[in-house]
Image: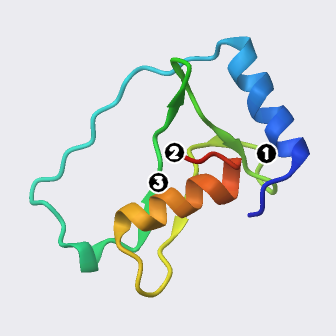
Amino acid sequence: MAYTEGKAQFIEGVLAEGRALEDTVVTFAEPPSPGDVRFAVVAARHRGRWVLCKHRRRGTLELPGGHREPGENPEQAARRELWEETGATD
């Protein structure tokens, strides 16, 4: 999903309201190999608050993420998805 000014305003509104989620740690019983990872989900914080995106069809707030593109490793996919959905860079 491409970055839009409306999306930026929505995210800024979420951040300005001070919404917060509990910190969550995800662990795997066995670490997945990079070839097994098909999706990337980004749990990102900006100025101490979680970054969420509003899903355009469901209307729900979700963590940025999506499918891996051919040739991407999981970190590259996560960085691309974060940029596509929020416009954020490192």
Q: Secondary structure at mark 2?
A: loop
Residue that extends furthest to the bottom in the rendered view of this protein: 70
Tell me the quadrant of the picture where the N terminus can be found: bottom right
Tell me if mark 2 has few (under 14), some (14-19) or many (20+) residues whose alpha carbon lies within 10 angstroms of its own: few
Compare marks 3 and 1 and give the one earlier in the sequence: 3
Badge number at residue 78: none
Identify the residue position indicated by label 1 in the image. 59
Q: Quadrant of residue 81?
A: bottom right
Q: Secondary structure at mark 3?
A: strand
For residue 75, above or below residue 68: above
Query: What amino acid type should be assigned to the residue bearing mark 2?
Result: Asp
Residue 16 appears at what percent x and percent y? 74, 15
- In this picture, is 15 found above or below 5? above
Q: Write the residue at 73% across / 51% down.
A: 55
Q: Position of residue 40 (x, y in %)?
A: 44, 61
Residue 26: % across, % down: 27, 42
| Label 3 Cα neighbours within 10 Å, binned few <14 / some 14-19 / many ≥20 | some
Looking at marks 3 and 2 on the same chain, the residue that comes earlier in the sequence is marked by: 3
Query: Dot 1 surroundings within 10 Å: few (below 14), some, or many (20 or more)?
Result: few
Residue in front for this viewpoint, 24 or 8 = 8
Whether residue 89 sits left or right of residue 7 in the image: it is: left
Where does label 3 land, which residue? Answer: 41
For this orientation, the residue located farthest to the left is: 30
Identify the residue position indicated by label 2 in the image. Answer: 90
For marks 1 and 2, the one nearer the N-term is 1
Q: Residue at x 47, y 67 (%)?
A: 77
Q: Residue at x 42, y 20 (%)?
A: 22
Q: Is there CB contact under 8 Å for labels 1 and 2? A: no
Residue drawn at point x = 43 percent, y = 66 percent = 76
What is the CA distance from the residue labelled 1 to the residue labelled 2?
A: 27 Å
The quadrant where residue 72 appears: bottom left
